[in-house]
Image (cartoon, rainbow, N blue to C red):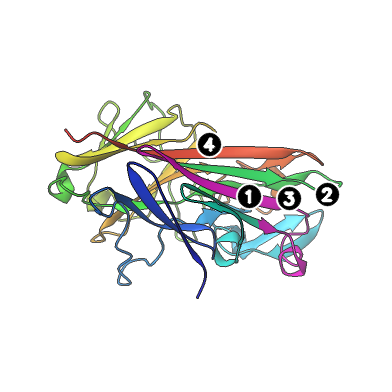
Amino acid sequence: MAEQVIIAGDGLSATINALGAELTSLKDTAGRELMTDADPAFWTGHAPLLFPVVGKPTGETIRVDGRAYAMKQHGFARRTMFAVTEQAADRATFVLTDSAETRAVYPFAFRLAVTFGIAGATLSVGVSIENPGDVPLPASFGFHPAFAWPLPGGGAKEAHRIIFSADEPAALRQIDADGQIAPAPRASPLDGRTLALRDDLFAHDALIWDRLHSDRLTYRGDGGARLEIAFPDTPMLGIWTKPGAHFICIEPWHGIADPAGFTGDFRAKPGVFEVEPGAAKRIAMRVTLLAES
């Protein structure tokens, strides 16, 4: 069994699995679970980290410098054991480095370090994507946390909503039958800055904002627990569930699934960034439990 690391502060406690450096539990001081129940009838994930791709590559293949490499949806980090390099009562760091296995599907040197910390009622997740190699490192990265729906004390599922921090006038993108980004846009379901959550919104997979203006949002029901999720470094966002499940995924992304029919070089894929040799790309997410209303 993979190592489970527990950290805690004055307002929250969290459990992280070294397999994938995956957050598997986030509880308030009363012990109420703020994350998914991971019902296997729907989805057993909790909060996988998406690296080095976000979404599904065309034919589950990426192309680098004229060579093709097998790459599963959302990449390999979520299925790979991380080393625990730091552990304290309120903080832990997990590290994944390249290996013969990763270079067979992603021909680059890298160091992916993920630090979880709790201060008061905020869980911070800081990611550093480092390039120890001698050529630019192309990559995407995404968070994929699944929060409880309904939240503790939040009332019925249909009472829950997500409120963006900024106006989001753009149309959304949608996933086609092959798991790629369809060329036709999807009309936004927002009412002002508010998304009223309903199962039928997700009948055709995720809602995807690829031209995001907000850097945070609030997820809440009628009373009870309320969460603020901040994502200052990611220009895209997915929101997803499986109809009938008891979770809602709020997914800040720096990357996206391949556009339908895309067969270009991985570096040209939308959302891919490059890390220069000796440099690092840092991406953060913060989850804050707000005072109950």
Q: Considering the numbered disc 4 on the image, is that residue within a helix, a strand or a loop? A: loop
Q: Is residue 238 left or right of residue 256?
A: left
Q: Earlier in the sequence, mark 2 or mark 4?
A: 2
Q: Residue furthest top?
A: 167
Q: Considering the numbered disc 1 on the image, is that residue within a helix, a strand or a loop? A: strand
Q: Amino acid at mark 3?
A: Asp
Q: Do the residues bearing badges 2 and 1 touch, measured as CB atoms within 8 Å?
A: no
Residue in view at x 26 percent, y 61 percent: 245
Q: Nearer the viewer, mark 2 or mark 4?
A: 2
Q: Earlier in the sequence, mark 2 or mark 1?
A: 1
Q: Nearer the viewer, mark 2 or mark 1?
A: 1
Q: Residues within 10 Å of mark 2 (few under 14, many from 20)?
A: some
**Residue occupied by mark 2:** 133
Q: Amino acid at mark 1?
A: Ala
Q: Residues within 10 Å of mark 3 (few under 14, many from 20)?
A: some
Q: Amino acid at mark 4?
A: Thr
Q: Considering the numbered disc 2 on the image, is that residue within a helix, a strand or a loop? A: loop
Look at the image and say whether residue 107 sits in the magenta stretch: yes
Residue 234, disc: 4
Q: CA distance from mark 1 to mark 3?
A: 26 Å
Q: Nearer the viewer, mark 4 or mark 3?
A: 4
Q: CA distance from mark 2 to mark 1?
A: 16 Å
Residue in view at x 20 percent, y 49 percent: 152
Q: CA distance from mark 3 to mark 2?
A: 19 Å
Q: Considering the numbered disc 3 on the image, is that residue within a helix, a strand or a loop? A: loop
Q: Nearer the viewer, mark 4 or mark 1?
A: 1
**Residue occupied by mark 1:** 113
Query: Which of 92 and 224 lies nearest the eye of the viewer?
Result: 92
Query: Which stretch is magenta?
Result: 96-123
**Residue occupied by mark 3:** 265
Residue 213 in the image, given as x and y percentages of width and height:
45, 26
